[in-house]
Image (cartoon, grey):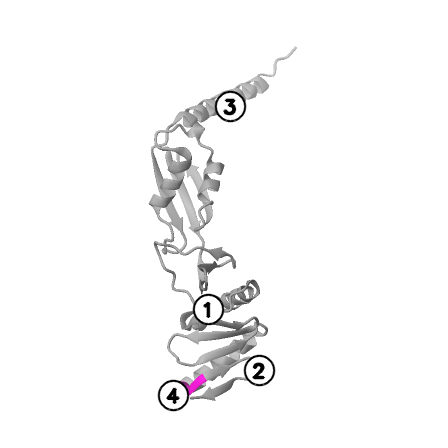
Amino acid sequence: MKINWNYIKFIGLIICITGLYSFSNHRNNLRKVSGITIKFTGEDNLYLTQSMVNKLLIQNYGIIKNVPKEKLVLNTMEEVIETNEMVKSAQVYVTINGELISNIEQRQPIGRVEGKTKFYLDEEGKNMPLSDNHSARVPIITGNITGKSLEDVYVILKYINRDDFLRKNVIGIHIEDEENYQLKFRLENFVVNLGNVTDLEQKFNNFKAFYTKAAKDKTLANYNIVSLEFNNQVVCTKI
């Protein structure tokens, strides 16, 4: 019987590689955590701090430094960090050198509700608590705060955030009633009656055309109400 040495060598190579991998993986798991680094992705506005994240981890796991890597359940640690209401998502991993890295994406507010309770609306339209560490410069929402009106306000805010002119100039949304919304601008004294949230693109295009002409004519100060709620029209009320 002829022995296939190439086959035997191949099998031996596979066994050696598997053994080396298992040995390396075992030694890696025995490596202890050398330190913790908290990184925040996205914007620089910090609604929570590194110390807050560290405290959250210590409350759930105790002191993590010098803990063997094999005792860490990284998925569970991510879930613990995500319990913080300021966190959108978290990714936790350990480097070859044993450093525990936590990349955290914070929730981003796009409006601030000033009602009986005060909170932010975030980029997904969900309630987000205010932060003691940072105050977001976002439009203030006032008036008749209801579930339906906040859904509409979220639609308005999403549109505003996609438009550079509106994002820089709209500082407030007042809810007169459901389907009746007013906008407050940064540098102007007039109120913009938006009406409901239908045909927002047409309404805002009409408004920007009016604004450009009135600014050129230097007549913006002559108006106290600008209504966009009528079909394809801009109706202005002078002071």
- Start-end of magenta stretch: 216-224
Q: Callout 4: few (<14), some (14-19), or many (20+) C-alpha neighbours within 10 Å?
A: few
Label 2, label 4: how far apart the Cα atoms are: 24 Å
Task: Name the residue beneath numbered marker 1.
Answer: 142
Would you say residue 41 sits in the magenta stretch?
A: no
The image quarter containing residue 94 is top left
Observer-side mark, 2 or 3, equals 2
**Relative to 92, 14 lies left or right:** right
Task: Name the residue beneath numbered marker 3.
Answer: 18
Label 1, label 4: how far apart the Cα atoms are: 30 Å
Observer-side mark, 2 or 1, equals 1
Residue at horizontal 41 percent and vertical 54 percent from the top? 42
Kind of residue at disc 4 = Lys
Dot label at residue 218:
4
Observer-side mark, 4 or 3, equals 4
- C-beta proximity under 8 Å, tags 4 and 3: no
Q: Nearer the viewer, residue 133 or 123?
A: 133
Label 2, label 1: how far apart the Cα atoms are: 23 Å
Q: Residue furthest right?
A: 1
Task: Name the residue beneath numbered marker 2.
Answer: 230
Q: Is residue 146 above or below residue 12?
A: below
Residue at horizontal 56 percent and vertical 79 percent from the top? 229
Residue at horizontal 42 percent and vertical 27 percent from the top? 28
Q: Of marks 2 and 4, which one's residue comes earlier in the chain?
A: 4
- C-beta proximity under 8 Å, tags 2 and 1: no
Q: Of marks 3 and 1, which one's residue comes earlier in the chain?
A: 3
Q: Callout 2: few (<14), some (14-19), or many (20+) C-alpha neighbours within 10 Å?
A: few
Q: Is residue 67 above or below residue 239?
A: above
Residue at horizontal 40 percent and vertical 38 percent from the top? 57
Q: Is residue 80 above or below residue 226?
A: above
Kind of residue at disc 1 = Thr
Would you say residue 218 sits in the magenta stretch?
A: yes
